[in-house]
Amino acid sequence: MSIKVKGFLKDVGGASRVTALRKASIENASASPDPKDPIRELADKLHPSGMEFIVESVRDASPTSKIFRFRSADGHIPPFQAGQYVNFRLRIGGSELTRPYTISSAPFEARGEEGFFEVTIRRNRPYLVPDWFFENAKPGVRIKGNMPFGTFYWEPLRDSKNVVAIAGGSGITPFLSMAREIAFGEMRDVSLTILYGSVRSDDIVLKEELDRAERASENVRVIHFLSGDPDWRGEKGFVTRELIEKYSGDDPTYMFCGPLAMFRLVRGIMDCMGVTCRRFRRDVISQPSDPTALDGWPEGNEKKSYYITVTRGIHEDVIKASGAEPVAVALERAAIPVDTHCRGGECGFCRSRLISGTVFIPSFGDGRRLMDKEMGWFHACSAYPTSDLRIKIPIL
Ligand code: FES
């Protein structure tokens, strides 16, 4: 939408005409309320409150990962940006869990009657939710959820048109979405170089899909570097400053998505290169499987267990929690519903009140506002108990 500026006096005069029109339409309006609410209708289309998705197909993305394609049960998929995620609501055992998965297909593929979206899930070791998807999410199965969420996407007012993406393992998914949107959709004037770290050439997640996008557009380039494949003819080893600088080009925006150890490495390289915060964007990193690797981890806490007294309205429960797990996981284990989206401490959906006790919050997973920190609020997805706790959570 463009706003035409006509000049100070004309604009002020225009404002008084609008006021007069508004008064006239209020005077002539019917006394009974208008059932139409176009703003609400638009908001419902953009952010539907509860959705149901149907698995349409499942295919391999590598020996350890699969691509799940979904359609919306009511035929409408809200518009999203390449890099955003869907939040699935699952019932596993007696617990209701929510899990975020980045959408690996492109925004343009979700439009129209045949619109769909895809997520890519990796299972390279036993893990509750990936196991559930691999064993249960067959074509025709319905799953509840919401979308879209997340702020990890290319923003023209802030980001350079030269994007250098650095990915590790299943952290490739937001960049495949971008690559597909550039190659076949509407981000055609953006150039994307993906530096993608894997271990072996025979287990590169989404390799065929990446090859296809690269072949279709000269604005998409994928550089694989492998850490555990001596026969690989391309770049070898872990991510380095030399590797990043070799493929960076002019004034890039760097975007990172990958495991914690790789994030630490890349963050250090960005600091050495003098890259500003504005030019380095990272995806929210879900809590690591080994919390003892977190900076500042309280030694020995992983071996301890605590009691958490949980208040929800008039309900009060006392649950047992491991010192190795975030509070949200302890709540889910006890079948107490907790609203989580990013599970990385950023979005605030799991915001809860700490009445008494202490928690450990890793610095990279602390997205709380300053006032929340001072007033004793914490994000249950990124806080580990370090004593018995008394907490208050919202009723769902
Ligand atoms: S789920 Fe996003 S902050 Fe906890």
Image (cartoon, rainbow, N blue to C red):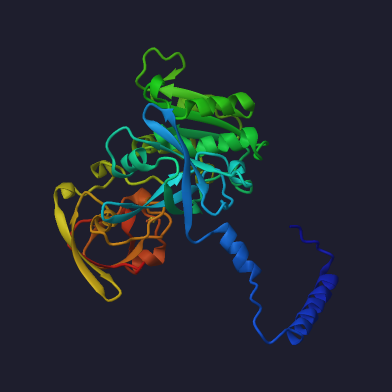
The answer to which image quadrant residue 355 occupies is bottom left
- Marker count (numbered): 0
* Quadrant location, the C terminus: bottom left
340 left or right of 250? left
Can I make out residue 270 in this image?
A: no
107 left or right of 61? right
- Residue lying furthest front: 140
The answer to which image quadrant residue 227 occupies is top left
Residue closest to the eye, 25 or 362: 25
Could you tell me residue 363's position as x and y percent? 34, 50
Give the residue at x 60% y 68%: 40
Relative height, residue 70 to residue 386 (above, below) = above
**Quadrant for ligand 1?**
bottom left
Can I make out residue 86 in this image?
A: yes
Give the residue at x 24% y 50%: 325
Residue closest to the eye, 332 or 357: 332
Could you tell me residue 184's position as x and y percent? 64, 34
Residue closest to the eye, 73 or 346: 73
The answer to which image quadrant residue 335 occupies is bottom left
302 left or right of 253? left
Give the residue at x 54% y 34%: 164
252 left or right of 125? right
Relative height, residue 234 to residue 280 (above, below) = above
Could you tell me residue 337's position as x and y percent? 32, 61
* Quadrant location, the N terminus: bottom right
